[in-house]
Image (cartoon, rainbow, N blue to C red):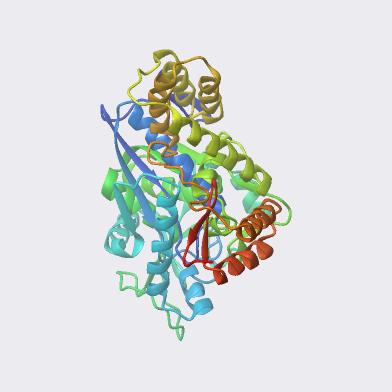
Amino acid sequence: MPLELYDTWSRTVRPFTPIHAGQVGLYCCGPTVYDHAHIGNLRTYVFQDVLRRALIRNGYDVRHVVNITDVGHLTSDADEGEDKMEKGSRRTGESAWSIARRYTEAFVEDWRALRLLDPTVWCRATDHIAEQIAFIAELERAGYTYRTEDGLYFDTIKQDDYGFLARLDRAGLQAGKRVAMGAKKTVTDFALWKFAEPGVVRQMEWDSPWGRGFPGWHIECSAMSAKYLGTWFDIHCGGEDHIAVHHSNEIAQTQAAHGTRLANFWMHGHFLTLDASAKMSKSSGDFIRLETLRRRHFDPAAYRYLCLTAHYRSKLHFSWTSLDAAQTALNRLRHLYEAWPDAGRVSADFVARFDAEVNDDLNLPRALAVLWELVKSDLPAADARATVDQFDTVLGLGLREWKSVKPVEHDLPQNIRSLLDEREQARSERNWAKADEIRKALGTRGWKVEDRPEGQRLIAIAAD
């Protein structure tokens, strides 16, 4: 089955054909690095990684570009409030530049923990100010800009089809004025360049033909994607929250400057929902990070597996119970795979069925169903391993690299065994405080305990 993907622009699933034979240009909106990424953010990147792997499996050479927003993203889509980097600087006492470096490194660490393929290009907004200024100048020459007391703005009224990606009701928005207007002509107009405020000291500002200031959020993606992929490339990805404003504005800018909608396919991952007790807002300071999962002794790969159990265009509900089920399923698959002998033959039938599900707009839940059907089949063990190797080029679970460990490496005295059993019970009940107390007690007796997804591992430090 040929690869078919859902295009938000057309609202249809349609066959994917690259603009240039054998090659795919893929741009994915990256993080704003004023804080850690939460697991809702990371779900979108798992979807994009699966997309890239599916493209590679279909024989394409993928040029994958991911931006790092380290300046110019205000606290609202209405170009109001404070730049998020400046806000983060005030919160932590660090410089905006230091915050950008620290949270970029943390994001890349999360990226690799989830076994996401590194992009061809990481591009930082602060490294491409000249390109953004040049793009804005092109828009000015084309007559799409106007100046206010606080910045240079894009005039959306000059485009009859502005907001088509989101099917925006422009008349309704204007009538309701649900976004503060300020000096803007139209409610949908957006900032291209924000001016430095008199008397306000900002850490990230640059000189420009319009005065000292900083770029708006949307211009960076149009400028950087054009630099690395051209002004008409194959696929642009992001979260569903980007459709109405950020991606609509990217398209408007590129239509005005270059006459294209930037990408042939626009693809969006849907939100992660959580139990009522959990929060997903960075601004609240209370959100679930990948490190939160680690502290509860879950493997990041289990979260990746959980993401694969729902279609990228459907909501995925997160709970500790669902993550525990994903960890259990992944561990079972790992142990089965490890026990199977090598040097088998790939099952053409199972591979064809798996690929058909993947090529049906990345239907990973059905692809996983094919995998578990294989597990339960009478396929010879070596052939099962060789076939699952093919599946894992898309799933990205790293089955071949994973190695089991013995939960206990020594004969244990009864008192140590009792403590270990008691701690395992505490972990199963999610009583982390008690589990940590027992860990300390084991440490005072000369034993170091390591928590692995497959169980506890105890190492003797000194004789008990």
Residue at (47, 15) in percent of width and height:
379
Residue at (37, 68) in percent of width and height:
101
Residue at (52, 23) in percent of width and height:
375
Q: Is residue 34 above or below residue 231?
A: below
Q: Is residue 403 left or right of residue 38?
A: left
Q: Nearer the viewer, residue 373 or 224?
A: 373
Res. 327 image quadrant? top right
Q: Position of residue 54 (x, y in %)?
A: 39, 31
Which of the image's four quarters has the N terminus?
top left
Q: Position of residue 220 (x, y in %)?
A: 37, 57
* Residue that lies at the very extreme toward the right in this rendered image: 276
Residue 192 visible (yes or no): no
Counting the numbered discs, the total is 0
Q: Nearer the viewer, residue 313 or 107?
A: 107
Which of the image's four quarters has the C terminus?
bottom right
Q: Nearer the viewer, residue 2 or 427?
A: 427
Q: Nearer the viewer, residue 33 or 8?
A: 33
Q: Position of residue 350 (x, y in %)?
A: 45, 17
Q: Position of residue 410 (x, y in %)?
A: 50, 53
Q: Is residue 303 above or below residue 460?
A: above
Res. 387 image quadrant? top left
Residue at (59, 69) in percent of width and height:
440
